[in-house]
Image (spheres, grey):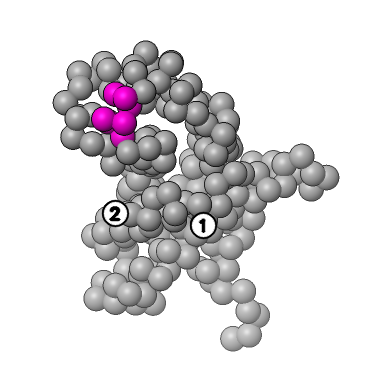
Amino acid sequence: MPKKTFFRLPAEKQQRLLVAAHAEFSRVPFNEASVSNIIKAAGIPRGSFYQYFEDKADIFFYDLNKMRDSSKEDLKTAILRADGDLFAAMRIFFKAMAEEIINGEDAPFYKHLFLHTDYKDRRKMSPELKHSHHSEGLTFLIEHIDYSLLKFDRDQSEELEILFHQLMNNVFQGIASYYMHQDTEQALTIEQVEHRFNLVVDWLENGASARK
């Protein structure tokens, strides 16, 4: 998180610094990004940068969290559009996420995130983010999903949490598979990625076994 001094800045200066950082993280992977380039583009001294943020990772994850705010709203919208049907909502959510991440204006940023930032790096750079996205989405789920479509009720929050985490993991694994197959003979289209995700959701919803 930014230091208190960052939030005392005029909104225009805050935005200028964040735009500069986002441009740098979109240009190159995190490990290659330079604080020097960020402060040059933002027009601030190096010393000022460290009055606002602890380090490069601090501003990177603040930028990422602001982007994640919109995806949290997309998830809530999907749940409402699906009238509380969790599995239908995840299909809607994945379609929107895949389109935004792969083809949206922030596609270069996300490409570096998925290709060059592994799980260990994310934990090391920002351990406090481990469950933040899941927790907020789970809270909304508990209040809005249709439990008549599930095999457990509202009081069984642990079961819902396990299912939700599995679905969210499949969202990110599905998008990661797109990037992993890029520049190979098995390159995937966004439609193929969506189809694969929907297959997994179908198996979770209906089971993959033919046995009765």
Q: Which residue lies at the image location 29% right of the left edge and 54% below the top edge?
A: 136
**Image position of 104 (left or right of 138):** right
Q: Is residue 52 magenta?
A: yes
Which kind of residue does numbered mark 2 sit on? Glu
- Residue 8 location in percent, x, y? 16, 26
**Circle 2 residue:** 136
Would you call the spot at circle 1 few (<14 residues within 10 Å), some (14-19), or many (20 or more)?
few
Residue 163 visible in the displayed image: yes
Q: Earlier in the sequence, mark 1 or mark 2?
A: 1
Residue 97 locus on image (x, y percent) = 49, 42
Residue 65's x, y, as percent?
36, 41
The extreme front residue here reads: 47
Q: Secondary structure at mark 1?
A: helix
The residue that appears at 52% across and 56% down in the rendered structure is 119
Magenta part of the chain = 47-53
Q: Is residue 192 shown above or below 203? A: above
Q: Quadrant of residue 153?
A: bottom left
Q: Amino acid at mark 1?
A: Lys
Residue sitting at x 76%, y 39% = 183
Q: Which residue is mark 1?
A: 120
Identify whether 108 is placed above or below 92: above
